[in-house]
Image (tube, helix red, strand yellow):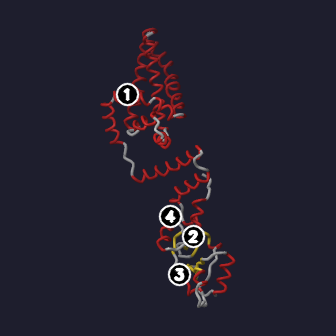
Amino acid sequence: MTYTFVILLCWTVSFFFAGIEAGLLSIDPVRLRHYVKQGKASALRLERLTKRPERLLITVLLVTNMANICGLLLLTKRLVSSTGNAGFFWAILLALPIYLFVLSVLPKSLFRRFPLRALAALGGVLNVISILLWPILELGGRIGRIFIPQASKNARLFIAREDLKQIAVQGEREGSLTSTERAMIHNVVDFRNVKASDVMVPIAKVVTVRPDTSIDETLKRSAAADVDRLPIISEGQAIGILNIFDIVFDQTRRETVANYSRRIVTATEDEPAYRIVQRLRAARLGLAAVVDSRKQLVGIITGEDIIQRLVQIGAL
C-alpha cells in the first residue's frame, strides 16, 4: 500500500511539472505583463519567477526527472518482488504508456492550452521548490548563462515590435481597440520594412512637364489632374520639381516652367520609405522622385502616399 501511494505521488508530481515545463515555453509575455499591471497577485508572483527563466526551467526539469526516476524504480521493485524477474518486463510494459501519454502528452497539451492560468495557480509551489533547490539552481544557472548566448539589442528591438503587435491584437479582442486602429498600429510597426517601390506612384500615372513646357499648358495639366506639384523631366530623368503656387503668385509670369524649377529629392526603388520621409522633412519638400539603376524616373512618392500606406487596412 505504501509503495502504491508513493508511486502515485511521484507520478502526480511528474504530471504537473511536465505541464509546467510546456506552460513556461508557451506563456504569452504580453498578457503576463498586462495582468501584472492590473496588480493580480498570481501574475506578480509568476512575473518574479520568470525574471530568471533558466533557473525556473532547471527547477522544473530536476523535479520532473527525479519524480519519474523514483516512480519507475519503485514500480520496478514492487513488480520484481511480486513476480520475480518477469517484473522487469511488466514494469516496462506498464510504464511505457503511462510515461509516454499520461505523464507527457496529456499534461503538456493541457498546460499549453491554458499556460497563464495553470502557472499562476502553481506559482507558490514553484517558488517554494526554487528556494529549497537554491544551491543546485544557482550552479545550474551559471552554467546555463555560459552556453545560452545573450540576446543582442537588435533582437530585443525586434521582440519589442512583435510585443507591440500582440498588444494591439489583444486590445482588439478585449474591445479597447477597433480593427482599424489595430491595423494602423501593425502598419506603423511594419513600416520599417516598406521600400520606395511599395508606395510610389508609377511614372505612367504621374503628370509631368518638360523644362520647355509653356505656363498655360502646365496650368491646364495641373487643373486636370488636380495636383499642385509636378516633376520636371528631361530625357527620362527628374531634374526638378514645379510648385504651381510659384506660378500663381508670380506677377511677372515667365514663359516656361524651367524658370520655376526647384531641386528634387531622388531615391532608389529599394530605399526604405522611412528614410525617404526623413530626407523630405530635412529638405522641407513633399515629393521625391524614384529612379532606377540608370537614374531614369520610374515613379514618385509624396507625403500623402506614405500616410495612406500607414492608415490603410491590410490583411494582417
First in sequence: mark 1 vs mark 3: 1
Does 142 sit left or right of 252 as displayed?
Answer: left
The answer to which quarter of the image holds residue 242 is bottom right
Q: Say which residue appears at 50% left-offset and 50% top-offset.
A: 164
Circle 2 Cα neighbour tier, 10 Å, few/some/many (<14 / 14–19 / ≥20): many
What residue did someone put label 1 on? Answer: 128
Does residue 85 sit above or below 23 in this rendering? above
What residue did someone put label 2 on? Answer: 302
**How far is the residue under mark 3 from the one under mark 2?**
16 Å
Q: Is residue 249 visible?
A: yes
What residue did someone put label 4 on? Answer: 274
**How far is the residue under mark 1 from the one under mark 4?**
50 Å
Q: Position of residue 253 (x, y in %)?
A: 60, 89
Q: Say which residue appears at 51% left-offset and 28% top-offset.
A: 107
Q: Amino acid at mark 4?
A: Tyr
Does residue 58 sit above or below 268 in this rendering? above
First in sequence: mark 2 vs mark 1: 1
What residue did someone put label 3 on? Answer: 262
Does residue 141 sit above or below 279 in this rendering? above
**How far is the residue under mark 2 from the one under mark 4?**
12 Å
First in sequence: mark 2 vs mark 4: 4
The answer to which quarter of the image holds residue 154 is bottom left
Provide the secondary structure element on which disc 3 rests. loop
Residue at the right extreme, as displayed: 224
Q: Amino acid at mark 3?
A: Arg
Q: Position of residue 255 (x, y in %)?
A: 61, 90
Q: Amino acid at mark 2?
A: Thr
**How far is the residue under mark 1 from the one under mark 3?**
72 Å
**How far is the residue under mark 3 from the one under mark 4?**
23 Å
